Image (cartoon, grey):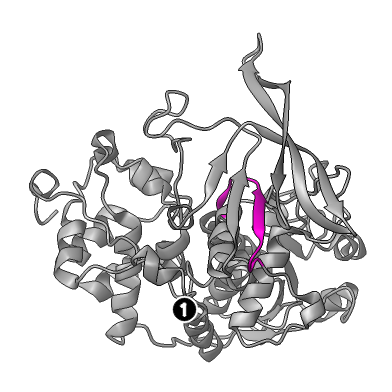
Amino acid sequence: MGNPKAFMTIMRKEAGYRPVDERVYDFSEVEQTLNIEDRKLQASRCMDCGIPFCHWACPLNNKMPEWQDLAYKGKWFDAYKILSTTNDFPEFTGRICPAPCEKSCVLKLHEEPVTIRENEAAVAEQAFLQGFIKPVMPSVRTGKKVAVIGSGPAGLACANRLNHKGHSVTVFEKDEAIGGLLRFGIPDFKLHKQVIDRRLDLMQAEGVAFRTSVNVGIDISAKDLLKEYDAVCIAIGSGVPRNLNVPGRELKGVYFALEFLQMQNRIIAGETIAESAMISAKGKNVLVIGGGDTGSDCVGTSIRQKASSVTQIEILPKPPANKNPDTPWPLYPMVLKTSSSHEEGCVRRWNLDTVKFIGEDGKVTGAEIEEVEWAKDAEGRMTMTRTGKKEVIKAELVLLSMGFVNPVYEGLLQELGVELTQRKNVAIDNAYHTSVDKVFAVGDAAMGASLVVRAIASGRDAAIDIDRFLRK
């Protein structure tokens, strides 16, 4: 702890966002960066607590006090070495993680937590910028082969760790490019795809093989993979979106959020989309159903596509703005979150349930909604009642952003003989080992839809189990 009084003398300073009237005209990253000296000062605010609740709250168990002290001292490579022992991709999480570490920082008690997430991104960027991050080939190859099905954050983390342990890893991806949710689900204004490509180039140079446009179970038999590889890791995500089965769902103009976001990401990547298949918000009243991060991404993307208006509704009640007595420190606070997209112009409403969609000539023109109320029952569970108050929200484009359910490839799992739980996630018998001898599962496929940081942690930990299995 180089500066024991910094937390008292230096205030929290965030890099902030680019001006709204500038950023809404492009898909470049909205978040700015502090200069190096300011960043060092922010890192110096870490108090090196006797009990680091930031470490406790982080799904990756990052060692914040250690690497932040090194960042404060300008020892960027040493900081990166410590950070990368727990986090394979700090340049990703430093941009898109909701930072549970900051919510559990002791300084959060005074609403001045250390800017851990931004500091993390800075450490990774300085390490890349100064040329510290170079390909490191495994000293010895074990002769064991592992197939990883899916190239999202969990699959990439698992592949990266197994490769470093000397196993030969091939990652299979059904889409045309590697990255999964990182590439096709998250907008460029939050995570520029060059950041992903830079890491993939490094992994390839270190020996990881990538095979794109290969749908395992269709293009390649899953059983053949079991014969060819010593272990198979299922990292297929939990990519089936939750549907809204109400009258009018079949109308043109009602889409899942990822259909909309994936198309925009592909357009930015240079893919040509047929006009008949185009999903565009331009000139339309857009209704986003669902109040989470994916819904927020739909808001920002719609605004950049020049929507006439954007409204986001949520069936749950509006959370408190700053502190929530139901989730006290050091727990993650369930409070109102206002994203950069919300700041760009969006009407947000809560306690609204969608009753039906209304349309003309087969196209959606609006949604009928009904107000609901929430209260705790005798057992403390939240129960919903309808008020009978209804209205119609005008919308020519409706985006369903209500979360995800079962894995994408149930057929693949059945072919492998892997059992599914009642929640439609992969059944785990022992750590990340499934009910099939050589088959493991990681990330959302194993635990349900969750955060990118949790997926990376899952992939990292599963690699330990797979390595142990291969070395028996």
Tag 1: residue type? Val
Left/right placement of residue 354 relative to residue 46 reads right
Residue 207's place in the image compared with 258, above or below, is below
Say whether residue 438 is magenta: no
Q: Residue at x 35, y 58 (%)?
A: 117
- Depth order, front residue of 391/156: 391
Residue 150's x, y, as percent? 70, 71
Residue 171's place in the image compared with 307, above or below, is below
Instruction: Tell me if I can see residue 427 in this picture.
Output: no
Residue 396's x, y, as percent? 73, 58
- Dot 1, how many residues are within 10 Å of its Cα: few (below 14), some (14-19), or many (20+)? some
Residue 298's place in the image compared with 292, above or below, is below
Instruction: Tell me if I can see residue 29 in this picture.
Output: yes
Q: Secondary structure at mark 1?
A: helix
Residue 243's place in the image compared with 468, above or below, is above
Point out the stretch of residues depicted in magenta.
281-293
Say whether residue 284 is magenta: yes
Q: Residue at x 16, y 64 (%)?
A: 38
Tag 1 residue: 195
Left/right placement of residue 97 relative to residue 45 reads right
Q: Residue at x 38, y 48 (%)?
A: 101
- Depth order, front residue of 443/13: 13
Residue 303 placement: quadrant: bottom right
